[in-house]
Amino acid sequence: MGPDAIGPLLRRLRVAGDLTLEGLSALSGVSDRAISDIERGVVRGPQHRTVLAIARALDLPAAERGALVEAARAGRRTGSHGALPLPPVPDDVPDFTGRGRELATITAALTGSRPRPVVIAGAPGCGKTALAVRAASLLREAFPDQLFVDLGGTAPEPPGAGGVAVREVLERVPAGRRLLLVLDDAAAEAQVRALRPVANRVAVLVTSRRSLSGLEDVARLLPDRLPATDAERLLAAIIPAGRATGPDLVRLARLCDHVPLALRIAGNRVAARPGWTAAGLVARLAGRDRRLAGLTAGDVRMDTAIGASVEQLGPAARLLFRRLALVDEPLFGADTAAALVDAPRWRAEDLLDELADLHLVRFAGADRYSFRGLVRLYAQGELAVHEPFAAGGAGRVAAGEGPSSPFSRQPSAARLVLLQGTRA
């Protein structure tokens, strides 16, 4: 009888030694990703010195050490044929902060007695992919095989469900093999449904800018902005010591609206420039008209992230989106939206649903919505570009400034609502 495959053998020995991947990595000096690749069959013939380092860390008796060495030798002889061609899940960021409740929910849904797919949906920049990647990293023990597929949800023409090459891979997964499938940036339910027949044998974690409300029997997560303390901790983890005081971090986190992507951009911008401080960036971002432009680090831009969602809107919803920048109240309803676009209430409700599906407005209950922070700043910029006359009246909808209303030329019914300073 030939030697065992090294992946399952190494996993049995590690588990018997009561060691996690990270623990074995620390003892052996071999990275946890390399050990994971061996266990998953991505690497079937690791180098001899790697195997010896792992064997020493496991403190194996001679017989088991010999079996491990022979399994690696056999793998080198046969090559990597038969290993699943798995696009790897991206590396987890070491300074990931917060989201403990969300991570617990994902773990429970994917590993419970009746596992269910998980859908992470949320606003631009809220850290959906980062959350999925952190969850995958924490679940590597439960799911040694992990497959990451970018579904291109914001591309002009997202890949069709039938053309996703992952189907072929999933169909080759042997029965009983524990695999986590991460579907990132799904454009529509059809992309996910097309994989469900073969994905029923694996755990599925989906991220999307849309709610994907048509999917049934899934656990849903809607991550929002980070709590203030977590936002400040994330900035402190990125910005080098000595370049930020506590009050600076508080102010910078507020200017970033506590949005994870904006926080990471701001932190990286300070860290990448010798001599820069958090206080200096606070001064640069203080002006509202330049804040989004200032949240740029290399090829990563906050306005690009928001714009990718806005581009998904139809013309009428995009008109409402930019005119919502005129609302000067924290909450508003369908009557306000109807007045802004001179439409019946039912039509305004449909447009608000479209905005809410992409998480560009947030449902606040009792027919109320919120529209705030960096997304509102983006809408103000859109209004200034497309309707400069209206932009001059920003913030006047709730104030009721009479003939100066930017929509004074609209039909009388809509004008009446605006002139009354509606607070729907």
Image (tube, rainbow, N blue to C red):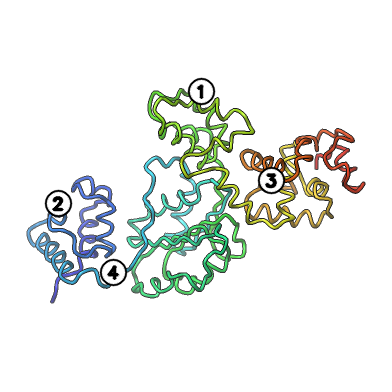
**Callout 2 amino acid:** Ala
Residue topped by disc 2: 53
**Callout 1 amino acid:** Pro
For mark 3, give the secondary structure. strand
Drawn side of residue 334 relative to residue 146, left or right: right
Residue topped by disc 4: 83
Q: Do labels 4 and 1 touch, CB within 8 Å?
A: no
- Which comes sooner in the sequence, label 1 or label 3? 1
**Callout 3 amino acid:** Ala
Mark 3 nearby-residue class (10 Å; few <14, some 14–19, many ≥20) = few
Residue topped by disc 1: 247
At a point 78% along the width and 49% down the height, the residue shown is 334
**Callout 4 amino acid:** Ala
Tell me which corner region of the image, top left, top right, bottom left or bottom right, holds residue 406.
Answer: top right
What's the CA distance linking mark 2 and mark 1? 47 Å
Drawn side of residue 302 relative to residue 235, left or right: right
What's the CA distance linking mark 4 and mark 1? 52 Å
Residue 92 on image: x %, y %: 38, 48
